[in-house]
Image (cartoon, rainbow, N blue to C red):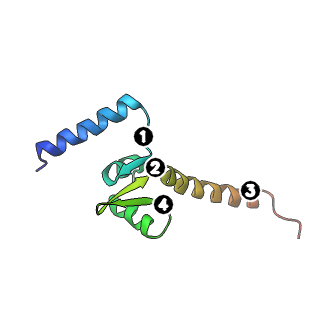
Amino acid sequence: MIELKEIIKEIQEIKYLLRSQTWPRWLPTKLAAKYSGLSANKLRQLYKEGEIYAKDIGGKLIFDRESIDEYFLKDKAKLKIYLDKIKSPSLC
């Protein structure tokens, strides 16, 4: 069962995000998961693989939002390059 403290903390995070209408640069794991749509385990895996950047603060990871964005954009760029290649084959 979710404790009242956890619910209050979640509401405070949501209120902060709604007020600022932007995501903070550094996101704790739960917030990074909400932002990215990835699970906390997947975020930790990507961090260990060097795909995204995070800092270990007192045994807890905080994730760099910009590196999460770059991770998703990297795949988009790879797809564009692939599609460009199949649209215009080289003259070999």
Which residue is under mark 3? 84
Q: Earlier in the sequence, mark 3 or mark 1?
A: 1
Q: Residues within 10 Å of mark 2 (few under 14, many from 20)?
A: many
Examine the image and state in which quarter residue 29 appears.
bottom left
For the point 76% across and 56% down, the residue is 87
Identify which amino acid the numbered label 3 is placed on: Asp
CA distance separating discs 3 and 2 = 29 Å
Identify which amino acid the numbered label 4 is placed on: Ile
The numbered dot on residue 52 is 4
For the point 59% across and 57% down, the residue is 74
Which residue is under mark 1? 23
- Label 3 element class: helix
Identify which amino acid the numbered label 2 is placed on: Arg
Which residue is under mark 2? 65
Contact, CB < 8 Å: mark 2 with mark 4? no
Residue 17 versus residue 6 in the image, above or below: above
Looking at the image, which is closer to me, 49 or 1?
A: 49
- Label 4 element class: loop
